[in-house]
Image: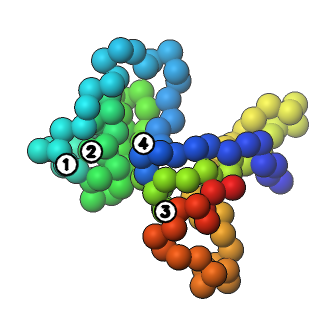
């Protein structure tokens, strides 16, 4: 059984999972639009690499062999995070729900209005 443990704010339409000890000053390399979305096995360990991975045909990718990045379903917003725990109470799995609105409620939301997708 999963339990909501918080939410994650997204302001670039993408998310990356990484051990924070691997982020350094070089990570802030600006997105180079000339290389937008080229498919690769692994992407550079910086913001440009994340953008290229999420804009690739797959929509995700490995970042510097130390992280993974993917695009979100609706772009910017706040998405709920759920955890499942082992018998000792340690986190076993994490799930980020990029589609927090039940499908039957879709008609109540405008596609271009991000505020509806916030938790």
Where does residue 91 sit, x and y in percent of width and height? Answer: 75, 35
Alpha carbons under labels 4 and 2: distance apart: 10 Å
Q: Earlier in the sequence, mark 3 or mark 1?
A: 1
Q: Judge from the rendering whether residue 79 lies leftward or rightward of residue 3; answer left or right.
A: left
Residue located beneath label 2 in the image = 52
Q: Residues within 10 Å of mark 3 (few under 14, many from 20)?
A: some
Alpha carbons under labels 2 and 1: distance apart: 6 Å
What kind of element bears circle 2? helix
What kind of element bears circle 1? loop
Where does residue 50 sit, x and y in percent of width and height? Answer: 34, 39
Residue located beneath label 4 in the image = 69
Query: Quick check: can you spot residue 46?
Result: yes
Residue located beneath label 1 in the image = 36
Alpha carbons under labels 3 and 2: distance apart: 18 Å
Q: Residues within 10 Å of mark 4 (few under 14, many from 20)?
A: many
Q: Which residue is painted at 17% across and 45% down in the image?
A: 33
Q: Judge from the rendering whether residue 26 lies leftward or rightward of residue 23; answer left or right.
A: left
Front tag of 1 and 4: 1
Q: Which residue is painted at 49% across and 53% down in the image?
A: 76
Q: In the image as oriented, which residue stretches furthest toward the left?
A: 34
Query: Quick check: can you spot residue 43?
Result: no
What kind of element bears circle 3? loop
Front tag of 4 and 3: 3
What kind of element bears circle 4? strand
Q: Earlier in the sequence, mark 4 or mark 2?
A: 2
Alpha carbons under labels 3 and 1: distance apart: 19 Å
Q: Which residue is painted at 29% across and 53% down in the image?
A: 55
Q: Which residue is painted at 77% across and 42% down in the image?
A: 5
State which quarter of the image contains the C terminus.
bottom right
Q: Earlier in the sequence, mark 3 or mark 2?
A: 2
Q: Judge from the rendering whether residue 30 lies leftward or rightward of residue 7; answer left or right.
A: left
Q: What is the number of the mark on residue 74?
A: 3
């Amino acid at each position: 059984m999963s339990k909501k443990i918080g939410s994650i704010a997204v302001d670039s339409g993408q998310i990356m999972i990484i051990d924070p000890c691997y982020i350094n000053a070089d990570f802030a390399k600006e997105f180079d639009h000339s290389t937008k979305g080229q498919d690769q096995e692994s992407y550079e360990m910086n913001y440009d690499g994340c953008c290229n991975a999420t804009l690739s045909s797959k929509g995700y990718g490995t970042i510097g062999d130390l992280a993974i990045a993917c695009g979100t379903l609706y772009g910017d917003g706040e998405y709920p995070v759920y955890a499942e725990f082992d018998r000792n109470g340690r986190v076993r799995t994490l799930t980020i729900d990029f589609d927090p609105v039940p499908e039957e409620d879709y008609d109540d939301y405008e596609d271009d209005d991000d505020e509806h997708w916030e938790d």
